[in-house]
Amino acid sequence: MIDWTQLGLASLVFARINELWYALPLIVVVSLVYSATRHELPAPIAEGAVRMAAWISGFMLIGFAVLYIMCAML
């Protein structure tokens, strides 16, 4: 049995990689729907969706980093 706590951050991410795939369609759909409620034309919808996806991904990454640091300090 592999002890994931001894292998570091990369192994932690790769151990749960199957679950992370669920975040991609959710980010895309939420970004598109939110942007479509703000704009009428396709170009501003696409620009807003890309911007919103970057924000969501950034917050998720920051949240992951905070939780990882908190777990490492235990």
Image (spheres, helix red, strand yellow):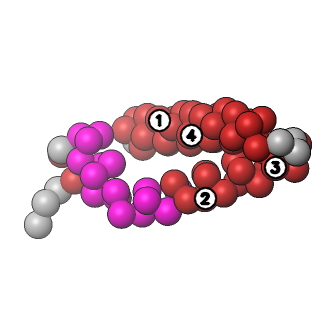
Give the spatial CA distance, label 1 vs label 2.
20 Å
Q: Nearer the viewer, mark 4 or mark 3?
A: 3
The magenta stretch is 8-23
Could you tell me residue 16's position as x and y percent?
34, 58
The numbered mark at residue 65 is 1
First of labels 4, 1 by sequence position: 4
Instruction: Determine which residue is flagged by label 2.
Output: 26
- Say whether residue 40 is visible: yes
Query: Residue 36 — which label?
Result: 3
The answer to whether marks 3 and 1 mark residues whose Cβ atoms lie closer than 8 Å is: no
Magenta segment's dominant SS is: helix
**Tag 3: amino acid:** Ala
* SS at circle 3: helix
Q: Which residue is mark 4?
A: 57
Which is more N-terminal, label 2 or label 1? Answer: 2
Residue 40 rendering spot, x and y as whole percentages: 88, 45
Q: Nearer the viewer, mark 3 or mark 2?
A: 3
Element at badge 4? Answer: helix
**Lateral position of residue 61 relative to residue 7, left or right:** right
Q: Residue at the location (70% across, 48% down)?
A: 31
**Amino acid at dot 1:** Ala
How far apart are the two marked residues, 3 and 1, measured between alpha carbons? 30 Å
State which tag comes first along the sequence, 3 or 1: 3
